Amino acid sequence: MSEIKKIGVIGGGSWATAITKMLCNNVTEVIWYMRNEGAIEHLKAYKHNPNYLSSVEFDVTKLVLTNDINEAVAQADYLIFAIPSAFLETELQKLTVSLTDKIIFSAIKGIVPETSLIVGEHFHHAYDIPYYNIGVITGPCHAEEVALERLSYLTIACGDENKAKFIAKNLSGNYIKTKITDDIIGTEYAAMLKNIYAIAAGIAHGLGYGDNFQSVIMSNAIREMKKFIRKVHKMKRNINDSAYLGDLLVTGYSVFSRNRMFGNMIGKGYTVKSAMMEMSMVAEGYYATKSAYKLNQGYGAKTPIIDAVHAILYENKNAKKIFKELTDKLD
């Protein structure tokens, strides 16, 4: 009889909550690390995460809850990281136990600012995790719809097919369908880039552009994404698959999209700081914009949408003027 592999979830936000909910449908025990001790106590008493997706009820007998990241890492064989990329390294610096014998899956859609690397590359270079022990969990899937038990799809990427299948099996259910792929780099870059394009869609909406222009933004965005990813990691992939185009569309159009919401506020005249304060949530695309723009200085892909969002967020350029210029670069 094979040994049962234990799965740990690192993070206390909405995506971590949704992933833990999916796992609890399939496994007898999930190790769940969240920093907030008050949230842990609330979960134990009332079976809900008080801060995120509070409608989700957990069978707490299936949860091993801890606010000690070392305890979670030590107990788990597979670790699913689901915290904002901007704060990943801060959490990892708390580690005193080794990650080298762990299988790491990232559900993080962003770039690690300290190294300007996507999360998988960061774990490989900074923590010596071999690529065959690194995987990616991507959409198209919003945590809020998982909470509502609406049909959702996930793509699981890993160089080791058996590890991808293991995670896919334990996340799947009657309202979660999963597929696997070996395009670890491409799917993770796509998950990062789509947040930038969702900010662009939000800015356009905030400025008063209609659905016709939104469709042009999205069709140009998927082609721009294809050019960028081909520069980073050239391999055979269908950019129209759900992991790329599907994830882009749901993030660009959904009312649950934090990045679209953030962009909408910017388009309406909010400053970056005021938009972040009002949202009280992290818009990954804000950090991704700076990193993607910087990376592309070396790659040289044609990225007018990324350039426009960067000019507005980081160069204090007028959004209305920048988007007027952008309209002449799209087709």
Image: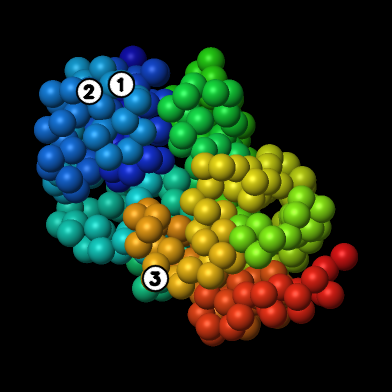
- Tell me the number on the disc at residue 192: none
Q: In front here: 135 or 251?
A: 251
- State the SS at label 2: loop
Q: Do the residues labelled 1 and 2 touch (CB within 8 Å)?
A: yes
Near mark 3 (Cα within 10 A), the count class, few <14, some 14-19 or many ≥20, is few
| Residue 288, placed above or below residue 282 | below
Q: What residue type is labelled 3?
A: Lys
Residue in the image at 60% along x and 42% along y: 254
Residue in the image at 22% along x and 53% along y: 98
Determine which residue is flagged by label 2: 47
First in sequence, mark 3 or 2: give its number. Answer: 2
Residue 142 location, x and y as percent?
Answer: 52, 38
In space, the residues marked 3 and 2 are separated at their CA atoms by: 34 Å
Determine which residue is flagged by label 1: 57
- Tell me the number on the disc at residue 273: 3
- State the SS at label 1: loop
Residue 128 location, x and y as percent?
Answer: 36, 61
Asked if residue 224 can be seen in this view, the reply is yes
| Residue 72, placed above or below residue 110 | above
Residue in the image at 58% along x and 77% along y: 312
Tell me if 244 is positioned left or right of 272 in this view: right
Residue 216 location, x and y as percent?
Answer: 81, 57
Q: In front here: 258 or 22?
A: 258
Q: In front here: 282 or 303?
A: 282
Which quadrant of the figure contains the N terminus?
A: top left
| Residue 287, placed above or below residue 244 | below
* Rendering quarter of residue 64: top left
